[in-house]
């Protein structure tokens, strides 16, 4: 059952339709796994006339979202682990300019790849993820015990962490404002919040419009730099740094994505891999400027 929602940022009920829903069947699966093939299939997207936030409405309610994410399994994420490791090593290098040690919580930690890398670098790590499968995989792969839950469960932590991270999580949250407030409350007074999310105001997204590949059912909020700054201010956080976020991925993973997004580019990359890379599965830094990385502290 889909539910119409007010703007999460300013709470107003005054939104204009930007893109009509592309979902063709009531039996269409939500695609709660982080890695899925649902590009171009999305709920109706609206824009708040008051504050400019883009979001999905109507959409599943919080109960359905929580249930879907608790049952999600993501074997492709697991297969692409080497790319995730490379991405997170770079993220930790960037983080080390601000903090080098202490207690770190990763929200939406999935299989625990980031936690494993952070632990190797001396951090005391904890994680939380809604997926029962991910929690089990994290224990199996890295021997790290993480808590099953969502941002709502952060209420149990008070001024406990030096760093909280959320990698590609906020756009999935039922209540992003509450998630940021809970993160703030769980940080020590000199703590740092670091997260990545989509940038719907990027040139790439504006050019592609409704063909932008990250319009997906699992993404229910679409931030830009202006709305992220407003979110931080409302949550009692102060922006330190906002920059473009890039992922390091394998050629095979790029082909997997392009096969669902752009068949022409799929065959171009496939030809390049065969003709010039001798079918080697090399890794590349990939980004179209449509993801952002945010550093913030308590205001």
Image: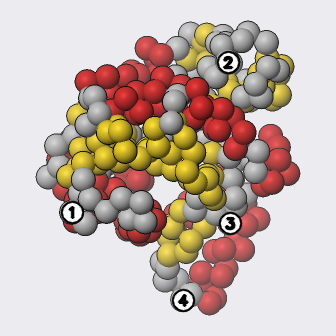
Quarter of the figure with the N terminus:
top right
Going from N to C along the chain, the mark reached first, 3 or 2, is 2
The reply to whether discs 3 and 4 touch (Cβ–Cβ < 8 Å) is: no
| Mark in the foreground, 2 or 4 | 2
Going from N to C along the chain, the mark reached first, 1 or 3, is 1
Q: Residue at x 79, y 20 (%)?
A: 50
Residue 214 locus on image (x, y percent): 66, 45
In this rendering, the answer to whether 268 lies above or below 255 is below
Q: Residue at x 57, y 45 (%)?
A: 239
Residue on which disc 1 sits: 122
In this rendering, the answer to whether 221 lies above or below 84 is above
Residue 271 locus on image (x, y percent): 67, 79
Which structural element holds mark 1? loop
Residue on which disc 3 sits: 266
The reply to whether discs 2 and 1 touch (Cβ–Cβ < 8 Å) is: no
Residue 91, located in which quarter of the rendered image?
Answer: bottom left
Q: Residue at x 68, y 66 (%)?
A: 266
Label 2 vs label 1: CA separation?
40 Å
Which structural element holds mark 4? loop
Label 2 vs label 4: CA separation?
53 Å
Residue on which disc 2 sits: 10
The answer to which of 241 and 2 lies nearer the viewer is 241
């Amino acid at each position: 059952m889909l539910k119409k929602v007010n703007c999460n940022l300013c709470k107003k009920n005054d939104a204009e339709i930007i893109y009509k829903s592309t979902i063709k069947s009531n039996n269409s699966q939500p695609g709660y796994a982080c890695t899925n093939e649902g590009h171009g299939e999305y709920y109706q997207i609206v824009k708040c006339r008051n504050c400019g936030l883009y979001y999905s409405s109507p959409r599943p309610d919080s109960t359905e979202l929580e249930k879907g994410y608790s049952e999600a399994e993501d074997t492709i994420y697991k297969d692409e682990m080497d790319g995730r490791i490379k991405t997170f090593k770079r993220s930790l290098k960037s983080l080390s300019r601000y903090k080098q040690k202490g207690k770190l919580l990763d929200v939406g930690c999935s299989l625990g790849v980031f936690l494993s890398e952070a632990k190797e670098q001396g951090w005391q790590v904890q994680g939380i993820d809604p997926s029962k499968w991910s929690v089990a995989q994290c224990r199996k792969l890295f021997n790290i015990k993480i808590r099953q839950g969502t941002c709502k469960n952060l209420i149990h932590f008070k001024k406990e962490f030096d760093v909280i991270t959320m990698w590609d999580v906020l756009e999935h949250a039922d209540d992003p404002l509450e998630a940021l407030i809970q993160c703030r409350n769980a940080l020590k007074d000199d703590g740092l919040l670091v997260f990545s999310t989509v940038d719907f105001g990027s040139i790439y997204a504006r050019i592609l419009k409704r063909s932008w590949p990250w319009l997906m059912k699992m993404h229910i909020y679409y931030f830009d730099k202006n709305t992220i700054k407003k979110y931080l201010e409302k949550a009692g956080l102060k922006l330190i740094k906002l920059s473009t976020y890039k992922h390091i991925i394998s050629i095979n993973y790029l082909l997997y994505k392009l096969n669902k997004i752009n068949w022409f580019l799929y065959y171009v990359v496939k030809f390049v891999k065969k003709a010039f890379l001798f079918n080697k599965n090399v890794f590349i830094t990939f980004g179209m400027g449509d993801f952002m990385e945010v550093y913030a502290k308590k205001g």
